[in-house]
Image: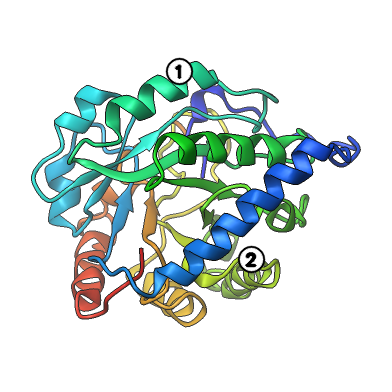
């Protein structure tokens, strides 16, 4: 998802051996797997409103809320407190096991943060613990994310951990390796790029990525759809642009595929990348209100409004 582009480097191929047969690691993964199974059974009985997550708001809570988003990424207690009525925070706990095979925040820092926010009425209960961790580069990633999930569960039994998993063609087994490491798994195919501007987005690739997650044993009740709401034609990264902002018609087709593969009634929440401009993302949904860009904001507002009659799980 490119959650932290200023520190990201190009993904390096790795021939590192798979995670060792550490008895402790296997035990932790078994415990997490069993816990997730219990959660999946409880999903059907606990209902709540549909949740829509926007990232990189940079304080534009009102703008995102006007488009129907009710979850915002925050990384400080002050930002959590600043959220308007009707919007709750998904708390970003720093990255880990993406490019550097370590956590940015220590267990002590995580403990202090969880204890400070877990009962805050503006906290959603969702802890965003890693963006696109790479087991090929960091073989211990599944175990380490499972350990962090276990730590958070011990401090906040109602809390849920979340990570976006890439699982692209250079690392096609990430879903299998990471499926029991966190509670909610974001699937982030971005099928619209400058190469298919005339032919249309790569919908086959979108379907394939979703099917890979399901075939890996991740139930739809734990899959978070990540919608492409960005392009790269006006970025300041210095790189040649690759992704392009989808049209309204293309967005409608993509969401139809998502609705088919991960039904609205099943998904814990959905996510749009990105609301605000980033070094590697421009234009974005915040800019897509008509005129020189398609009016994706109105489209998403209407899409979310149609969901209100569907009761999703927690």
Report the front residue among 86 and 155: 155
Q: Distance between the residues labelled 2 and 1?
A: 31 Å
Classify 10 Å Cα crowding around label 2: few (below 14), some (14-19), many (20 and above).
Answer: many
Please tell me how many numbered marks the rendered image carries. Answer: 2
- Residue 69 numbered tag: none
**SS for dot 2:** helix
Percent position (x, y) of residue 297? 23, 59
Instruction: Say if residue 222 shows up in the picture.
Output: no
Report the front residue among 167 and 101: 101
Percent position (x, y) of residue 298? 19, 65
- Residue 109 numbered tag: 1
Report the front residue among 38 and 213: 38
Determine whether 35 is above or below 254 in the image: above
**SS for dot 1:** helix
The residue singled out by tag 2 in the image is 213
Determine whether 124 is above or below 48 in the image: above
Percent position (x, y) of residue 114? 37, 29
Percent position (x, y) of residue 296? 27, 62
Q: In which quarter of the image is residue 8?
A: top right
Instruction: Tell me which residue sits at (20%, 23%) in the image.
Output: 78
Instruction: Tell me which residue sits at (24%, 37%) in the image.
Output: 119
């Amino acid at each position: 998802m490119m959650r932290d582009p200023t520190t990201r480097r190009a993904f390096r191929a790795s021939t590192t051996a798979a995670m060792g047969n550490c008895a402790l690691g296997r035990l932790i993964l078994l415990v997490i797997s069993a816990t997730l199974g219990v959660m999946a059974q409880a999903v059907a009985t606990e209902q709540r409103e549909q949740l829509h997550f926007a990232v990189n708001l940079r304080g534009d809570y009102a703008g995102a809320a006007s488009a129907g988003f009710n979850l915002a990424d925050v990384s400080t207690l002050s930002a959590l407190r600043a959220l308007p009525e009707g919007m709750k925070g998904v708390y970003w706990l720093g990255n880990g096991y993406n490019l550097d095979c370590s956590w940015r925040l220590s267990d002590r820092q995580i403990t202090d943060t969880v204890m400070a926010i877990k009962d805050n009425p503006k906290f959603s209960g969702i802890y965003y613990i890693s963006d696109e961790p790479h087991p090929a580069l960091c073989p211990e990633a599944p175990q380490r994310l499972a350990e962090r999930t276990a730590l958070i569960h011990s401090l906040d039994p109602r809390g849920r951990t979340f990570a976006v998993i890439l699982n692209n063609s250079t690392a096609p087994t990430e879903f299998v390796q990471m499926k029991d490491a966190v509670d909610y798994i974001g699937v982030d195919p971005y099928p619209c790029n400058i190469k298919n501007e005339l032919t249309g987005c790569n919908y086959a690739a979108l379907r394939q990525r979703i099917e890979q997650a399901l075939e890996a044993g991740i139930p739809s009740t734990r899959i978070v759809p990540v919608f492409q709401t960005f392009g790269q034609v006006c970025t300041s990264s210095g790189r040649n642009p690759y992704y392009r902002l989808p049209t309204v018609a293309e967005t409608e087709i993509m969401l139809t595929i998502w609705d088919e593969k991960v039904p609205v009634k099943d998904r814990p929440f959905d996510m749009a990348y990105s609301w605000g401009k980033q070094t590697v993302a421009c234009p974005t949904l915040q800019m897509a209100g008509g005129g020189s860009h398609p009016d994706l904001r109105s489209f998403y507002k209407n899409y979310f409004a149609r969901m209100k009659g569907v009761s999703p799980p927690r």
